[in-house]
Amino acid sequence: MTILLLSLMACGDVSNDIFDDDADFLAALPAAERQTVGFSEDTTEAEARGVGERAELVDLSVSIAGGVNTFVFNVLGLVDHVRTLPPTERTQDSRRWGPYTDGCDVDATLLIARNLGVYDWSVSGHPPEGDDAVVLYGTHFSGTSVSAGDGSFVWDQGRYSGWCGAAETGLVTVAYDNREGVDLLVDVAGWSDGTAEPTDWRYAYSRADSAGDFQYRTREDLADDGSDALADVTVRDRWVPGAGGRSDAVVTGGGFGAAEWRWSQCWDARGVLTWETDNLGVFGESGDVTQCAFTEAAEVDRL
């Protein structure tokens, strides 16, 4: 933020190509197509159970990935909106968009400043009643190009909810690396919808040309017993694009009591189950493990 403020206050000559430089500033901002989870493009809705049917862990992961993506899309909506507008102020190393009115009648402003390939940016707002406050801010480091870099951004859901009369609270931090493929860490701290105790979550996702890796923790009724005590579930999905992949889950609590249930499934490029096994004999073993894209189990290691 210090770099941002100093750059905006600085005086000096402005070069003639300042208007041609807008693309670099936009490339330094996060974009939904880069900072979202691309786990599966398959939309099959076949009922799962058994080799040759849709793999349950694929469906669970697609659902979790969709929830993460929806959230990130909503967060970045403030940023994406400015891409449709020309800057309202330009200097040699800074841009300003706004103020413009968002969906909650808040006058929002996006500021971004550049210093030696480092871009600091923030989105602040002025509600009809209340003081100016920053709800979204981040830093981007250029790579071989501006967009092929890395950085992070933070979203203050509680502050934004206060503007909009909503109940959700929490702080979301997204760290990303676009230098070799896509790598994301999404940390959610103190999240609550106003009706439950705050919880913390982390999602990890990486994707290169040769392989993908998606890791997450969730709470589900995987015992399917209707119990109010949900199980804690960690899942790691690894896949080879166009070939298929493997999901390894560890389940504790809920209907499984003190037992630790380890459940693995392999699936083809369409998400169809080709092999599965589990240590408690809930489903037993079926299919051929040698046909798996990954024959060895792997636990989460980034959560």
Image (tube, rainbow, N blue to C red):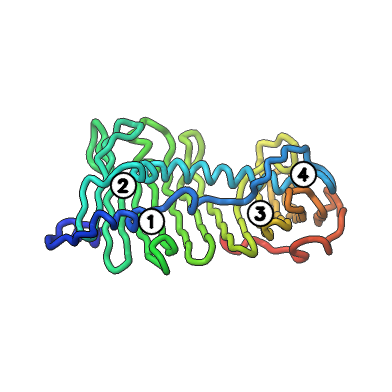
Q: Mark 1 — residue?
A: 27
Q: Mark 4 — residue?
A: 54
How far from the left and from the top, in percent, is residue 293?
A: 75, 62
Q: Nearer the viewer, residue 210 or 110?
A: 210
Left or right: where 188 falls relative to 213: left
Q: Mark 2 — residue?
A: 123
- How far apart marks 4 and 3 lie (CA) works out to 17 Å
- How far apart marks 3 and 1 lie (CA) works out to 33 Å
User: Nearer the observer, disc 2 or disc 3?
Assistant: 2
- How far apart marks 2 and 4 lie (CA) works out to 42 Å
Secondary structure of the residue carrying tag 1 is helix
Which mark, residue 235?
3
* Amino acid carrying mark 3 in the image: Val
User: Nearer the observer, disc 1 or disc 4?
Assistant: 1
Rate crowding at label 4 as few (under 14), some (14 to 19) or many (20 or more) other CA atoms within 10 Å.
Answer: many
Rate crowding at label 2 as few (under 14), some (14 to 19) or many (20 or more) other CA atoms within 10 Å.
Answer: many
* Amino acid carrying mark 4 in the image: Arg
The reply to whether discs 3 and 1 touch (Cβ–Cβ < 8 Å) is no
> With respect to residue 102, does 244 lie above or below?
below
The reply to whether discs 1 and 2 touch (Cβ–Cβ < 8 Å) is no
How far from the left and from the top, in percent, is residue 119?
A: 32, 60
